[in-house]
Image: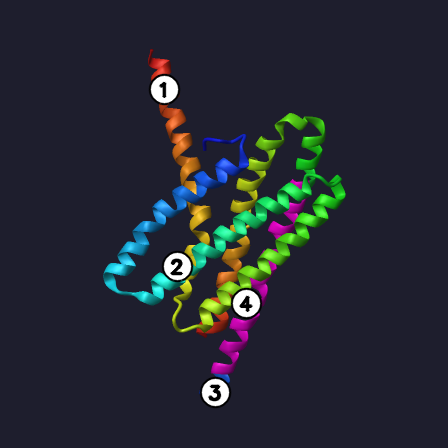
Amino acid sequence: MKNMDNPIKLQKEILKKTYLIALLPIVSALITGAMDVLLGFVFGLVISTLLLRLKYNNIRRALKMDEEKAEKFIRNRYFIEYAMYLIVLFTAARNQDLNFLAAAVGLFMMKFTVILWTILDLFKDSIQQKLESYK
Amino acid sequence: MVQFSPEVVDTIIRAAALLGAGFAMIAGIGPGVGQGYAAGKAVESVARDPEARGNIITTMLLGQAVAESTGIYSLVIAIVLIFTI
């Protein structure tokens, strides 16, 4: 990933890439007319975007504390976020207008993007190293 | 051989599914403990090298975002077990 020393730019980069990848399922859901899938996916994606922002704010706050306090703070905040995920998935499962699996995939989209981009970066680095070794 | 009525079998399946959902939720504890530990170490690192703060925040943000996915997997499995059976 680029911008590893600037958290705000990194967040923007992650969001940009996530939305770019998310266009594919959104457009395919629009074409097939599966509105519950579209709504569920967008619902999950929006919540995961907001939770990324919340996580950034929590980390920034935690770094101003001492070690033990930060540990406890982040642990407590994780369980609050976990409860939010529970509410989102519960809502998606109960509501007939939202597809549960699409909402789950929307929530995971950002994580998949980060993992995918890291693997691609590793792949690119290894290819570059091999090219340099040939020179 | 003991034969159960369909209602009893249905109740056993439902109970097993709910028990499985409860066990799946245990997986949600691990990432919380791990994230807390990572945060403590990040604070230690910032105290040692304040100039690397930005780099530490981004590494922690990416690490925590990916680490919590295992917790959400368990949540999805638990909800599927509760609502589909």
Residue B4 is at least partly visible in this image: no
Is B3 rendered above or below residue B32?
below
Q: Nearer the viewer, mark 1 or mark 3?
A: 1
Which SS class for mark 2?
A: helix
Question: Looking at the rendering, which quadrant does residue B41 occupy?
Answer: top right
Question: Pointer 2: what residue?
Answer: A41
Q: Chain of mark 2?
A: A
Q: Nearer the viewer, residue B22 or B31?
A: B31
Q: Mark 2 to mark 4: distance in Å?
A: 24 Å
Amino acid type, label 2: Phe
Count neighbours of disc 4 (C-alpha within 10 A) and say few if under 14, some if 14 to 19, many if 20 or more: many
Q: Chain of mark 1?
A: A
Q: Circles 2 and 4: CB distance less than 8 Å?
A: no
Which SS class for mark 4?
A: helix
Residue A17 is at least partly visible in this image: yes
Q: Nearer the viewer, mark 2 or mark 3?
A: 2
Q: Chain of mark 4?
A: B
Looking at the rendered structure, whether the residues under marks 1 and 4 are on a common chain is answered as no
Whether residue A8 sits left or right of residue B48 in the image: it is left
Magenta span: B10-39
**Magenta part mainly helix, strand or loop?**
helix
Looking at the rendered structure, whether the residues under marks 2 and 4 are on a common chain is answered as no
Q: Mark 3 to mark 4: distance in Å?
A: 21 Å
